[in-house]
Amino acid sequence: MSDLILDYTNVMSAAVGEDNGLTDEEISALAPRAKQIHEELASLRASGDKPFYDLPYKKEEAKKLKRAAGALAKNFQNFVVLGIGGSALGTTAMMTALAHPRHNNLSARKRTGARLYVADNIDPDEFSALLETLSLKDTVFNVVSKSGATAETMSQFMIVYDLLKARMGKEWKKHVIATTDPKNGILRRIADKYRLKTFEVPLGVGGRFTALTPVCMLPAAAAGLDITAMLEGAAAMDARCKSASLKENPAYLFAAIHYLMDTSKGKKMTVMMPYSYRLKDVADWFRQLWAESLGKKQDFDGNPIYAGQTPIKALGATDQHSQVQLYVEGPHDKLVCFLETEKIDSQLTIPPVFGDEPELEYLGGATMNHLYAVEKDGTEYALTVNKRPNMTIRLPQVDAHSLGQLLYMLEVATAFAGGLYRVDAFDQPGVEFGKKYAYAMMGRKGYEKLKKEIESGEKKSRRTV
Ligand code: PA5
């Protein structure tokens, strides 16, 4: 199996000049801190405090999930995830990367597994449309919530429960699987009370680090994706991440470049731009990982820091005709990270038609694959000559093994970046704040005081025209 490659040529000052690029000395100066952070994280891992690191080795659990997925496939055509944030984004990223791009439209014979839907929003139009168009008897709902309380997910579940009960009576339970905390939370209580089939979100693994847990692995297995190869890819990346050296450890180098770009070169934004439709939702998944983990107002000691770099997702070649103008000529405030793959499954040749149009001759007979690669090279070139730092993560191909490498690398990079910024990469008080607002304003018991505070504040500050 080949390894993914991190090509950082174009973040160096030799490519984009000293104001925007890094020197070897700047990177090397981080080495002592890197070593210290590496040792701290390794000791937390050894003490069991950061269990996400060891998820690649849960092969027995993967077997169990595959068996469960196989059993589900016998009874259900549709698998619907009810979840949001870390309980949804990884699943979507895996599906887009690994399933047939029109998986849900294929006939059962051609599909690798169940049709998969990820309902990660509560827009009433969208959610009702999904429920209206599914054949409920062919559908299993996987309600996924680590906390077991998130209003979006629980409201979806309550609607689905009501609907299933009305249509199926006692049989409703066969159509629900809960993935949640092993012991605590409302969802766990409901699951225990009704003896629902359950899977566990391992203790100590935060929402956005759950890609390799049943949160994403059960839906992935249900759709027929190769979750074992994903774990193997992650384990291969873990082996590469054992080194404290920035020049050897791709996750640490990725984090260090981002950190230095943010803190010493004014690159307050980072754009992840796949030139692979299959990887487009990895950029979405990464956006949450980087934003929620590093966007913090306090450092380890409680001092104000207001850290974080804004992650942006883009897609090549689509966004060449939308965003790239800004990236190439706008403010010098971005780092661009391309994702690309050496091999694309399909090969499309552009036929040499319209012979009476000599200006189209260059396309006729060329492959779309070649055009796609040239477009990426063109964007990279335009950025570099305009002194815009950019790097490329190159996958040998988009398969389960390389996706496992990529997701795990980005998780390790995020944990390490937390150390560089000196912030807790594993909490999300800003997200919790939003959840509490929803609880208070929807009248949840215990949140009456917060509701009053919010309402009085809103009256004072509301201005409209
Ligand atoms: O990463 C996180 O912690 C969050 O984005 C959560 O995943 C998200 O808020 C959903 O939470 P839960 O799984 O508890 O419903």
Image: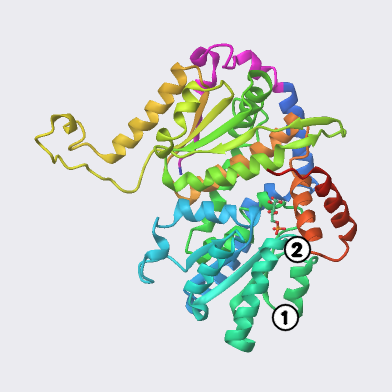
Please state which of residues 162 and 245 is positioned toward the viewer in this rendering. Answer: 162
Q: CA distance from mark 2 to mark 1?
A: 17 Å
* Closer to viewer: mark 2 or mark 1: 2
Q: Measured from the top left, where is residue 157 in percent x and y?
A: 66, 70
CB at mark 2 closer than 8 A to ligand 1?
Answer: yes
Secondary structure beneath label 1: loop
Q: Is residue 238 visible?
A: no
> For this view, does 305 lie left or right of residue 374?
right
Label count reads 2
Circle 1 sits on which residue? 194
Magenta stretch: includes residue 283: no
Please state which of residues 88 and 1 is positioned toward the viewer in this rendering. Answer: 88
Q: Is residue 235 above or below residue 71?
A: above
> For this view, does 75 lie left or right of residue 245?
left
Q: Residue at x 37, y 42 (%)?
A: 343
Q: Measured from the top left, where is residue 397 in percent x and y?
A: 42, 43
As drawn, the residue found furthest toward the left would be: 356
Residue stretch in magenta: 2-31
Secondary structure beneath label 2: loop
Q: Measured from the top left, where is residue 164 in percent x and y?
A: 60, 80
Answer with mark 2 or mark 1, whichever residue precedes in sequence: 2
Q: Amino acid at mark 1?
A: Tyr
Report if the CB atoms under discs 2 and 1 are less than 8 Å apart: no
> For this view, does 326 lie left or right of residue 142?
left
Q: Amino acid at mark 2?
A: Ala
Q: Is residue 196 visible?
A: yes
Magenta stretch: includes residue 5: yes
Q: Is residue 422 above or below residue 123?
A: above
- Which label number is shown at residue 149? 2
Mark 1 Cα shell of 10 Å, populated few (<14), some (14-19), many (≥20) = few
